[in-house]
Image (tube, rainbow, N blue to C red):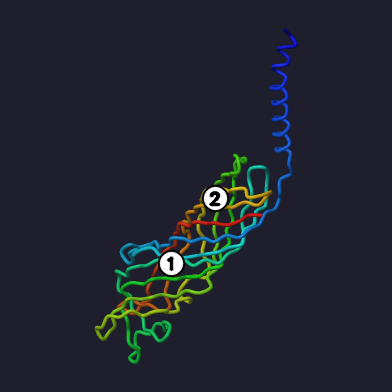
Amino acid sequence: MKNTILTKISPAILLFFAFSLRTVAQEDEPLKNFRFGLRVSPEISWMKPGDVKKLDGAGAKVKMGYALMTEFRLNKVVSLATGIGFEKNGGALNYTDTAYYHFNEEPLKININDTVNEFFQLKSRNFSVAYWAIPITLKMRTKEIGVMTYFAQAGINLGIRTKALSEDDVRSTKKTNSTLEDINISKDMNFFKAAINVGAGAEYNLAGSTSLLISVNYLNGLTNVSKSKSDYMFRTDGTAYKQKFTNNAVSLSVGVLF
């Protein structure tokens, strides 16, 4: 009788110990302290006015970015995720308050007494601004569930402007409406920007430490992306046009981590 019972429970005991040893072995596997990879990030980007009496949001734009990703493991759960990438942001604004400038391939310096150049009243502007982007976030991962690992991340994104172009709908002092394209407005945009970065995603293990990554991130602008006092636009009384707006975005990232 005893032998029969032992015969029945022995396989179960062996399976239990085998599973336990496998689990311990998995948990004891050395974790990589450094990972790197590449990603592409299509995003929906828009401008958020600081003063709705002067500016009005006029829609979002779809832009594209790409980046080198790096991760430095702090412990079994948390990593410092950073890297460097290139991204384009955009959006449109309606200028509900009177703003004038004059134009000759790029905006000219304010000069209310200019009688040579034609003046334009800015009605709306579509922005296309390029940045070198540096994310600095804490990435918190779950344990591997099957072949999937889930994570959340939070931190900031820093941006260094490289170039800014606009497409402007204007009305000239000659009472004609027109659209001016590819206006270089780099000197009227701030060189630096910062945004809060929060997101969530998952990694699908391909082999070893190589994983396919997908995440969705929300970027909430913290800083004025334009110069607060324009060098190019002015009001009816000839004073410099004051402006303030931030850049927000929702980004989808798809990449590979090694």
Give the amino acid at mark 2.
Ala
Question: On the image, numbered disc 1 is attached to which residue?
Answer: 90
Q: Label 1 is placed on what type of residue?
A: Gly
Q: Which residue lies furthest to the top in this view?
A: 1
Q: Residue at x 30, y 70 (%)?
A: 97
Decide: marks 1, 2 in contact (CB < 8 A)? no
Q: Position of residue 79 (x, y in %)?
A: 64, 49
Disc 2 is placed on an element classified as: strand
Q: In this view, does 109 lie to the left or right of 98?
A: right
Image position, residue 239 (x, y; %) = 36, 77
Q: Which mark is residue 69?
A: none
Q: Residues within 10 Å of mark 1 (few under 14, many from 20)?
A: many
> Eyeballing the image, is 202 above or below 91?
above
The structure residue drawn at horizontal position 53% and vertical position 57%, both measured from the top left corner, is 253
Residue in front for this viewpoint, 139 or 246 = 139
Question: Can you identify the residue that label 2 sits on?
Answer: 154
Classify the position of the N terminus by image quarter. Answer: top right
Q: Where is residue 82 in the image (x, y as percent from the top left)?
A: 61, 57
**Distance CA(mark 1)–CA(mark 2):** 23 Å
- Tell us which disc is closer to us: 1 or 2: 1
Camera-nearest residue between 170 and 96 = 170
Compare marks 1 and 2 and give the one earlier in the sequence. 1
Relative to the observer, which residue lies in front, 213 or 107?
213
Quadrant of the rendered structure where residue 91 is?
A: bottom left
Q: Disc 1 on helix, strand or loop?
A: strand
Quadrant in the picture for the C terminus: bottom right
Q: Residue at x 26, y 83 (%)?
A: 176
| Coordinates of residue 220 in the picture (x, y in percent) | 46, 56
Would you identify the image quadrant in which residue 115 lies?
bottom left
